[in-house]
Image: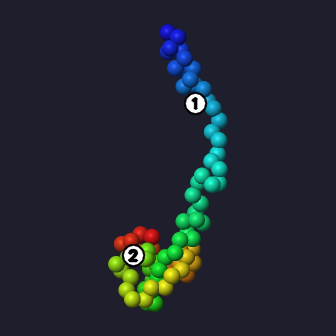
């Protein structure tokens, strides 16, 4: 009986304790994911990872954030 009471009390305490927010360093920010380097081509309208097979000879590096701002879309194959 004491064991069941202790388990119920422990569960109640865990459920009722306040949830503390994560520190900024513990959560990936949207900006950090957009600061990665992606590649565009002279004639294309998509951005790619460096190893994407859809990239041809022209391979222009830029940040993902700049590529999105310049109206490039994500490649459907490499999904950068």
**Percent x, y of residue 67:** 53, 78
* Residue behind mark 1: 15
Q: Is residue 24 above or below residue 78?
A: above
Q: How many marks?
A: 2
Give the left or right position of residue 22, taking residue 52 as reference.
right
Query: Toward which corner of the image does residue 14 lie, by quadrant?
Result: top right
Q: Secondary structure at mark 1?
A: helix
Neighbour tally class for label 2: few under 14, some 14-19, many 20 plus, Cα within 10 Å: few
Residue at 57%, 20% in the rendered image: 9
Residue 5 % position (x, y): 54, 15
Percent x, y of residue 20:
65, 41
Q: Are marks 2 and 1 in contact (CB under 8 Å)?
A: no
Image point (56%, 23%), residue name = 10
Q: Secondary structure at mark 2?
A: loop
Give the quarter of the image for residue 77.
bottom left
Is any part of residue 62 visible from this angle? Answer: yes
Task: Please state if 57 lies on the left or on the right of 36 as rendered.
Answer: left
Name the residue that disc number 2 marks. Answer: 51
Determine whether 70 is above or below 35 in the image: below
> How far apart are the two marked residues, 2 and 1, measured between alpha carbons?
47 Å
């Amino acid at each position: 009986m004491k064991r069941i009471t202790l388990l119920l009390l422990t569960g109640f305490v865990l459920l009722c304790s306040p949830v503390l927010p994560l520190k900024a360093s513990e959560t990936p920010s949207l900006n950090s994911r957009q600061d990665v380097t992606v590649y565009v081509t002279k004639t294309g309208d998509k951005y790619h990872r460096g190893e994407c097979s859809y990239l041809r000879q022209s391979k222009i590096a830029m940040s993902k954030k700049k590529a999105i701002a310049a109206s490039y879309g994500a490649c459907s194959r490499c999904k950068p």
